[in-house]
Amino acid sequence: MKMIKLGPDGPQVSQFGIGAMSFAGIYGNASENDSHAVLDACRATEVSHIDTSNVYGNGRSEEIIGSWFAANRGARNEMVLATKAGITGEAERRFKNDADYLEACLDESLKRLGVDHVDLFYIHRFDRAHSIEDVAGTLKRLIDAGKTRSVGLSEVAPTTLRRAFTECPIAAVQSEYSLSTRAPELGLTQACAEMGTTLVAFSPVGRAFLTDAPFTYEHGQSMAFTKSNPRFMQPNYDANIEATDRFRALAADMGEPAAALAIAWLIAKGDHVLPIPGTKNLDHLSELVRGTQIELSGEDLARIEQALPVGWAHGDRYTAAQWEGPERYC
């Protein structure tokens, strides 16, 4: 497993992480045993990054990770652990970056995880009631208190990253990035490379569109996020399946799983890009990890771009309500 530096000051981390939102049943039921099996497989394949949040199942994802640490002596020392806070779930104030609120959220996360610190603590959404400089100052104080070793931001603009950096080094920015969501290439990937910040790419297989077995329209309608998401609504859903059929055919021609090819494409974008797919299935995890072992040539990359050129996706990646919080910058 290739290792990279997380942020300008380390630590070393695998250039592939496991996104633990699936552990909380966001994309269908997930048992604790299934989630633990995924974590066991990650450990066996030297995947050393786990990404979660206090809002994934209202803390359930963190609890599952915490119970896995408790059952596996030494595992915590082998993992670079990240969590997030800043989404309240409240109707009136959905995002909150108040200093006391963030620290209280982190304290609760530490209890659920069964640890005394995390390696990376993100602002899950930037709350514009504060300046980003003030928020970065809050994050710096959490580092000084020993509750996190480094800090990050999620779904922010390149300018926000640069402003935050004036107050505190930002180890990572998390953003949706894949062959189906290319917006980070219009400034964010460049800013992260410039600042030494790791770009942590969530949904790197396009919420299953970039796999050999994308879920059906009917299954998408059974899940809270996708049932109203523009890319999973008709006629966009059928158009996106037809478009990604070209990618699946290319992957088959190359003798690789489609999901592996999607991961390899992201890793080829640079040592500062770290994909964090989520899964509760060991076969899927094996396909995803395979992507870390593929060396793509210039010709391979050109074939991928020909199959899925920039702008191929039908529909926005978020609804109007889902766009509340993430910063648009292009």
Image (spheres, helix red, strand yellow):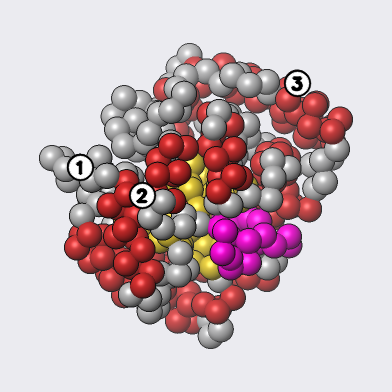
Q: Using the image, tell me which numbered label, if any, was put on residue 306.
A: 3
Q: Amino acid at mark 2?
A: His
Residue 234: x, y in percent?
45, 17
Relative to 35, is 129 on the left or the right? left
- Residue 236, given in percent of the width and then of the height, sits at 49, 17
Q: How many marks?
A: 3
Q: Which amino acid type is marked by label 3?
A: Gln
* Residue 329: % across, % down: 43, 28
The answer to whether the residues at label 2 and label 3 have Cβ atoms under 8 Å apart is no
Upstream in sequence: badge 3 or badge 1: 1
For residue 8: magenta? yes
Query: Tag on residue 129?
Result: 1
Query: Closer to the camera: disc 3 or disc 1?
Result: 1
Q: Mark 2 packing: few (<14 Cα in 10 Å), some, or many (20+)?
A: many
Residue placed furthest toward the front: 166
Instruction: Tell me where the magenta segment starts and ends, as one range.
Output: 1-18
Q: Is residue 238 above or below residue 264?
A: above
The percent coordinates of residue 146 (x first, y second) are 38, 76
State how far apart marks 3 and 1 are (Cα): 43 Å
- Residue topped by disc 2: 124
